[in-house]
Image: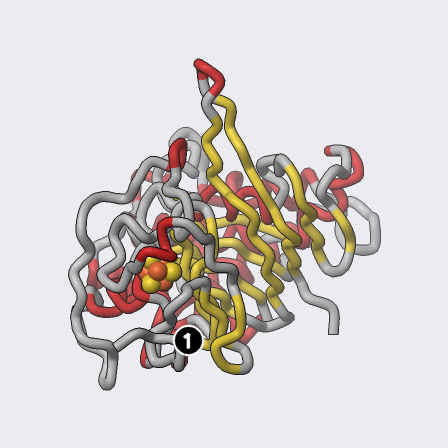
Amino acid sequence: STPVLELRDVRKTYRLPRGQKLKAVDGISLRVMPGEMLGLVGESGCGKSTLGRCMLRLDDVSSGQVLFEGRDITTLSERKLRPLRPGMQMVFQNSTAALNPCRRIGDLLAEPLRVHPAPDGRRRTSATITARLHELMALVGLPASALARYPHAFSGGQRQRINIARALALSPRLVVADEPVSALDVSVQAQIVNLFADLRARLGLTYVFVAHDLAVVRQISTRVAVMYLGAIVECGETDAVLHAPAHPYTAALTAAVPRPVVGAAPAMLLRGDVPSPVNRPAGCRFHTRCPQAQARCGVEEPLLRAIRPGHEAACHYPLGGEHRKV
Ligand code: SF4
Ligand code: MG
């Protein structure tokens, strides 16, 4: 079948004063198949939010291609993108900033339904919109009475439910959620993560779930892509990546997951800070912090390649591989 989302060598470069270039996204290719839940993981500043915005053409890419349901949307005009927008939606991290405090929840949720015509091309009637608002409240587990209230009346978790309802209003096929639980209390995080899992099962949604935390992604992702300094360094089925990480960076991240994964690689500490994406290290982008680094790593860039079927890593000496120097 056709991927819901496909990225082909996508790059996003920002030009800084003094002629410097910041390569926020540095050549990413990936496919997200229908019904998949891809977890995109990395430390803050690795480019994952920028990539998320590029996926939905909320940001233009500098080069490469973005395909939505097989259609190249890389350079589509805003006018031609418009009819595609209902199919691809974003949930943002900050549930408060995303909701206009002066408008009732019912108005906020009705807005996309008023702006975009129904799939048959007709404008929705107010009766249809009202019925849809009630459906949306039920979907995200809020009472219909919430529609008459203002955002300040809700807790952070409830506000995130409202944001999710808004993203779902137009029945998207693809949802990109950018750290949708990072700003919430740990106890509330689990509820929202469960809601995402539940919605996927009920609506057949395809998600890209952006997180800095493997623990969050582990619960709901079918596949995980690990990002470091603008590139994917490892990608594969969630169990494979978490139980048998091939890239030393992923191994370090799994070691940092609070509840240790059974059989995970021994704990590894990351040395130093993430280097600046303006002057990313030559060779392997991780070599300045890698406990396994060897001379070759500072010179030659490792490309993403298959370690096992469906599991790729960008490392000259993948963990558990034959090439690993003992
Ligand atoms: Fe570490 Fe070298 Fe692998 Fe990079 S290529 S992750 S520096 S072992
Ligand atoms: Mg971010």
Instruction: Give how far across and how far down residue 277 sits, in percent.
Output: 39, 37
Three-letter code for the amino acid on which mark 1 is drawn: Thr
Residue at image location 51% in from the left, 63% down from the top: 304
Camera sees residue 82: yes
Residue at image location 47% in from the left, 59% down from the top: 302
Residue at image location 64% in from the left, 61% down from the top: 173
Disc 1: which residue: 238
Q: Is residue 280 left or right of residue 62?
A: left
Instruction: Give how far across and how far down residue 4 sits, in percent.
Output: 67, 63
The answer to whether residue 155 is above or below residue 12 is: below
The answer to whether residue 104 is above or below residue 127 is: above
Secondary structure of the residue carrying numbered label 1: helix
Q: Is residue 170 left or right of residue 305?
A: right
The answer to whether residue 167 is above or below residue 213 is: above
Camera sees residue 219: no
The answer to which of 98 and 101 lies nearer the viewer is: 98
